Amino acid sequence: MDAARQISAVLFVLLLLGAALWALRREGGPLRSLGRRTAPDQAPALQVMGRITLTPQHSVHIVRAGAREWVVATHPQGCTVIGGGDTTGAAA
């Protein structure tokens, strides 16, 4: 009787996990609205416009936030802002 109780408890937990996964993955799940800070028709607040990989651990990114763009270098110690400016054609 003890083994049947343990097996039913494990199956119940797996059923709960499956139901939670289904609820989180379906369209309009309970946590979908928490990550959305902009309206669906607006561009995201932060965009990666381009990326060049220099080595497996070093790369250069162009990042846009609103009307500004930055050139950011990433490396094992972190990241460094190389330059920045407006997107109206100003050189970085």
Image (tube, grey):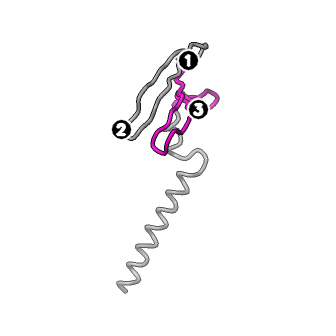
The amino acid pointed to by label 1 is Ala
Q: Are marks 3 and 2 in contact (CB under 8 Å)?
A: no
Residue at mark 3 to residue at mark 2: CA–CA distance: 21 Å
Q: Residue at x 51, y 45 (%)?
A: 30
Q: Is residue 3 left or right of residue 25?
A: left
Q: Position of residue 56 (x, y in %)?
A: 49, 45
> Residue 43, percent across and down?
60, 27
Residue closest to the eye, 85 or 3: 85
| Residue 48 versus residue 2 in the image, above or below | above
**Which corner quadrant holds the N terminus?**
bottom left
Label 2 with label 1: CB-CB less than 8 Å: no
- Alpha carbon distance from label 2 to label 1: 28 Å
Up-down: is 47 above or below 69? below
Q: Which residue is mark 3?
A: 50
Q: Amino acid at mark 3?
A: Gly
What residue does disc 2 label?
A: 77
- Would you identify the image quadrant in which residue 66 lies? top right
- Read off the residue under disc 1: 67
In primary-sequence order, the first of circles 2 and 1 is 1
Q: Considering the numbered disc 1 on the image, is that residue within a helix, a strand or a loop? A: loop
Residue 36 in the magenta stretch? The answer is: no
Separation (CA) of disc 1 from disc 3: 16 Å
Question: Start and end of the magenta stretch?
Answer: 37-66
Which residue is depicted at the point 43% across and 25% down?
A: 81
Q: Position of residue 33 (x, y in %)?
A: 52, 38
| Element type at mark 3 | strand
Q: Is 44 in front, or is 68?
A: 68
